Amino acid sequence: MQQTAARRALRAAAVVTSVTITSALTIGPSLAADPIKIGSVLSATGPASFLGDPEQKTLKLFVEALNKKGGILGRPVELVLYDDGGDANKARTFATRLIEDDKVVAMVGGTTTGTTMAMIPVFEDAKIPFISLAGAIEIVEPVRAFVFKTPHTDKTACQKIFEDMKARGLTKIGMISGTDGFGKSMRAQCMKVIGDYGITALVDESYGPTDADMTPQLNKIKNTADVQAVLNPGFGQGPAIVTRNYAQLGIKLPLYQSHGVASKSFIELAGPAAEGVRLPAPALLIADKLADTDPQKPVVMDYKKSYETATGQPVSTFGGYGFDGIQLLVSAIERAKSVEPQKIRDAIEGTKGHVGATGLYTMTPTDHLGLGTESFHMLEIKGGDWVPQDKK
Amino acid sequence: MAEFLQLVFSGLTIGAVYALVALGFTLVYNASDVINFAQGDFVMIGGMGTVFLMAAGLSLPVAAMIAIVAAVLVGLLLHRLAIEPARGASPVSLIMITIGASIFIKGVAQLVFDKQFHSLPAFSGTAPIAIGGATILPQSFWVIGGMFCVVAGLWLFLEKTLIGKAVLATAANRLAARLVGINVTVVLALAFGLSAAIGAVGGILVTPITLTRYDVGTLFALKGFAAAMVGGMGNPIGAVVGGLLIGLMEAFGAGYLSSTYKDAVAFVAILVVLLVMPQGLFGRRAVERV
């Protein structure tokens, strides 16, 4: 008896917590119907908060708007949000809680690759669809029945860059990669696909994530005969220093940076040296510069406007991943006309030509990401701003 | 030859900053036997402080002066609040205190400043200067020249002023210094303040080249420590030579061997020095007086 009482108290506590988190979202006109519960574990605080925070804001905004419009299938949506603080152990605990206590029908979340990988077994075992917002390709390769993801992978970025190089007739390149997680992973992915484009890397240099001077490495590349272009997979300040050193050494070859530095702060840090640098970037970054015929333009502009008016902060690509995740899920539930997890899964896998903020999604049983290289736009930095290079 | 020159320029520029950090280590070590691992964070305070003061609308020289003064204040506070209360503790305990202080400074810097990378405009243009087929940034001259000015200034201060002599006397023998009426506590505070100023100057000079962030101090502290060890802990000339050596070795290591092991160079150098000549290149052989 006592035990049941204790358990009841615990459950009540759990309910109270989730209610306090979600109360703002469930207050809607259609409270009468039983809500559809969608779970989300994000790293809204902690070291990955720059990713998780915009994701959380986006999900909240979207669900709020959705409920104002009457929800899905005539039922309101309840978003059950947990913050793992970037801790994979916590993420796993929350994932179990989402399934066992909250009984969610699907999950959109997993800010980092670490937290996502920790949660995958939980959702796979419970057969609940899980749309991850994390970057690494390991999440969807090999394909797992219930796991999907929305962000581009480094591989797509590599392919986009190599496509552009090939189009410009640059086939012999030098690589200089950061030894941080991002740089390492992207370098490995690039090396895997580089052969498909008939491009060879003549030199392959690296630098530490905190290095302050890359002239020795760049000098080596400069003195390697026949190099036609240089690619720098990296994240943080490294690429900015590489770009500065590149200009200092007077290297005139085309320099390619990765999507890891696709932000205004890169242009600020690299200064005038950034002129002429090319990099692949998602549509959100250049929302107002997209051609009017671009299918993504209305989606991207809409999202940008609603996010920026609601939060007063500039939109980020990371929030876009969350936006696409929840949209893919909602559209899948609508098409499935059911909240059966198995049916939702099948509907997500059947996604065709879904226009998202990140790109156009077409899922297949062998591709649970569904983005092609067209989801990246090749940009060149000119006059301190991005100039799209797609229209040729 | 051009490649060799390029590596020399690269090594000397970074080495000059290591030298300044090592100089800070040396000053504090001489006055107190403490190795102050918060030394690298003064570099950060100099750089970040200047960035944020300039963002607030001040001109570069004014912002730099205020940032140096701020670093000195932090140095004095570090001495007054962390080192002085633990007076009499063993040097190992004091070193641990400085590591704690370093973590604390980084934490506060995250709040006071932010967690982004920042840069300063170069003092005199960014057009690289070509010398013998290699190129060097005008800012590198500022860094190397600034380092030599600081060394010269420090030498004048120590040799030509009474307070400087007091610092030297304290370094030579604390008990004797106290006996002849030198206020050792004041001298110690002075050493902390001075080393903070030197670190901050280094930070301001190098930020246009290397960028800065709240946590850049750690790396500078480690490399500066390596430089001080190689040169011989406690010897100012050793600190300068050690700093430049570490910078050059890193550049040559990355340029001629493999960039993968660039960061290892400094630590291999410490190991070799400790094994082969524990007193460093210029250090006095430690003698236990009974």
Image: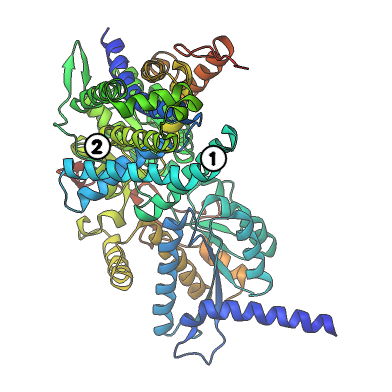
- The alpha-carbon separation of the residues under discs 1 and 2 comes to 55 Å
Whether residue A87 sits left or right of residue B113 in the image: it is right
Q: Mark 1 points at which residue?
A: B87
> Mark 2: few, some, or many residues within 10 Å (few <14, many ≥20)?
some
| Front: mark 1 or 2 | 1
Answer whether residue A200 is visible to the viewer in this image: no
Looking at this view, name the residue that lies furthest to the right.
A1
Q: Which residue is at 40% across, 13% downward? A: B256
A41, B180: nearer the viewer: B180
Q: Mark 2 points at which residue?
A: A277
In the structure shown, which secondary structural element does the residue marked by tag 1 occupy? loop
Q: Which chain carries label 1?
A: B
**Percent position of residue A270, x then y:** 25, 39
A39, A309: nearer the viewer: A309
Check disc 1 and give the amino acid type: Arg
**Percent position of residue A78, x then y:** 52, 78
> Mark 1: few, some, or many residues within 10 Å (few <14, many ≥20)?
few
A256, A24: nearer the viewer: A24
Whether residue A132 sits left or right of residue A8 in the image: it is left
In the structure shown, which secondary structural element does the residue marked by tag 2 occupy? loop
Looking at this view, name the residue that lies furthest to the top.
B1
B106, B114: nearer the viewer: B106
The quadrant in which residue A197 appears is top left
